[in-house]
Amino acid sequence: MILRIAQIAPLAEAVPPRLYGGTERVIWWLTEALVDQGHDVTLFASGDSVTSARLVPCAETGLRLAGINDHLASLLAMLDRVLGVADQYDILHFHIDFLQFPTFRHLAGKCLTTLHGRQDFPDFWPAYRTFPEMRLVSISGDQRAPIADANFVGTIHHGLPKNLIPFSAGGGDYLAFIGRISPEKRPDRAIEIAKRAKLKLKIAAKVDRADQVYFERQIKPLLDDPLIEFIGEIGDAEKPAFLGGARALLFPIDWPEPFGLVMIEAMAAGTPVIAWRSGSTVEVIEPGRSGFLVDSVDEAVAAVAAVGGVPRAGVRAAFEQRFTADRMARDYVRLYERLIAADKPAMFGKTMIAAA
Amino acid sequence: MILRIAQIAPLAEAVPPRLYGGTERVIWWLTEALVDQGHDVTLFASGDSVTSARLVPCAETGLRLAGINDHLASLLAMLDRVLGVADQYDILHFHIDFLQFPTFRHLAGKCLTTLHGRQDFPDFWPAYRTFPEMRLVSISGDQRAPIADANFVGTIHHGLPKNLIPFSAGGGDYLAFIGRISPEKRPDRAIEIAKRAKLKLKIAAKVDRADQVYFERQIKPLLDDPLIEFIGEIGDAEKPAFLGGARALLFPIDWPEPFGLVMIEAMAAGTPVIAWRSGSTVEVIEPGRSGFLVDSVDEAVAAVAAVGGVPRAGVRAAFEQRFTADRMARDYVRLYERLIAADKPAMFGKTMIAAA
């Protein structure tokens, strides 16, 4: 069955994003995969987005680079456009948290919302309580733990295009850290692990303004060591070489990361991941097959010693089996079809009630 | 005619606010005055609000002091409550910018939104364009200049309870500055004026974390002078003495302040205001009667010399005539009645269309 699907993206960044923007990258990959699988897809996103789907531009450019700080008005205007054409779609798939709940609750049966952020702060909870008919998808099982009784209809892990990051059979002699320099990403742990394991560590990371003091005070003093190389921010084009040339990716996070794209990027390159047991890592990493899960620096140092015994081809196989964009899109389509089937019998009655 | 009025407040602070919160203070005064004038008023606000109206608590306490950073979900939940009882009111008066536009557009005829913030950034404009039927009130004429073609139905200046700040016949020998220490409030100008006028300046101001660097680098070095006294943050209880004891209030702002409550607080005490010609000041200050409008430090120094000739009783009279909460409430009631009258004939037809 060919589905008529609307993907509704945040407007902060273009799809795909010019620079950072995990959510926008995932929406891009999902949209491309849905088109590849033959569906009729419309993307509501900023006007500088690039897509194989039909693009409905809802802002001239991504708002962040346009200097718009408050996105609310632009998002409400986008939702008004979506509402005006909602009857042209079988599924309205939202990626902007819960802002659409009030205006789309009468269409709850064809709406699906993927939550992309952490849910352990209470700030968002009133929305889930007030609009319980709105269906949610979590991007990991761990993500939904704080709001387990919200209306989740599935957990769908993210996926990457199969050929985005090619398999690198050889690997290399350094450990890799990639992400933001921030207390929750724990670059200090990565540095300690590398020094104790006596292996080179390459840190590819940007420093946000909010983290500048943390970087200067906590991290910079640790960089003065021949083993530690801080290479700054890298772009998507440099990622395959950076990840493919590493012996292992260190992912020593200290927060409930709802997914963690970099883990599956490393896996695509065949590079095993040494991750702290936190947030989604337990769901993503299969110990011994795609990396190791650890709870301490001691365990991480031991994992670095053991990681040479993890075949890189097996890491890549784990990626291809579980974390491609094609798999992600197929999971979503199955869910869309389930929702459509469930909504059909009740639809006429609901419309009557809404109009009464 | 007794009106059934709903006032919908932000949830950031209680009404009245425990600490700062200009919007919440104005809502408090307006609500009390409407009750005094015999109307049937309901206040949708945080549960720790204190009001003579009927309170519908929409969050346990003010969200900021509760540590909730993102208020969106709580506001949407509040709007859902308001929507559920909308038919019990003649007027729904919103003070939360434009978040209610999508869900209340079918009730546009009984909705009124007072814009409390600056409108010169383009961030909010898509909301006014997308929902042009929603009626707006500006708190000064200047505030609406950047969005002059939005659907404004009136400008209503703020007002204070008549007896909140008593008239101080004597005044005093110092200049007063009150507000935040921030570049747009220009405390540096106030200091320069005082030094050149050889008069004492008392600065009652808080320093937000965002302005800490500005304070340390730009302002602190200027404080080391026997004429300048920095007394830090003061509470509402200390304001009457602080303002009433001053020879004049300096209001040397460098931004389009949409209203500027402190000007009318000073006027209530009988203290004339020397204000930069910017934002709303031209509408609030009557030169020679309640203070002076200036464009430069030179003019401000001259105004300080001239301000002794402004009778304090006349300043107080200007306040009582134009800036009491009673006057503000009467202005709003007149506007409510006009909207209700305009909406009446079309109401039946509109309801039919909405239900079709």
Image (tube, coloured by chain):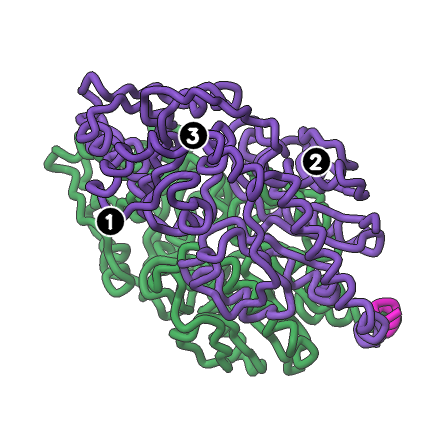
Chain colours: A green, B purple
Q: What is the spatial separation of the Cα atoms under label 3 and label 1, in whole angstroms?
A: 59 Å
Q: In which quarter of the image is residue B171?
A: top left
- Mark 2 vs mark 3: give the one in front: 3
Would residue A196 be seen by someone viewing this image from the given angle?
no
Which stretch appears magenta?
Answer: A348-356
B255 relative to B318 in the view: left or right: left
Q: Mark 2 falls on what kind of element?
A: helix
Question: Given the image, on which type of amino acid does mark 2 rest?
Answer: Glu
Chain that bears disc 3 = B
Q: Name the residue under label 1.
A: A204
Q: Name the residue under label 2.
A: B32
Which corner quadrant holds the C terminus of chain B? Answer: bottom right
- Mark 3 vs mark 1: give the one in front: 3
- N-terminal of the pair, mark 2 or mark 3, is 2
A187 relative to A318 in the view: left or right: left
Q: Residue at x 70, y 38 (%)?
A: B33
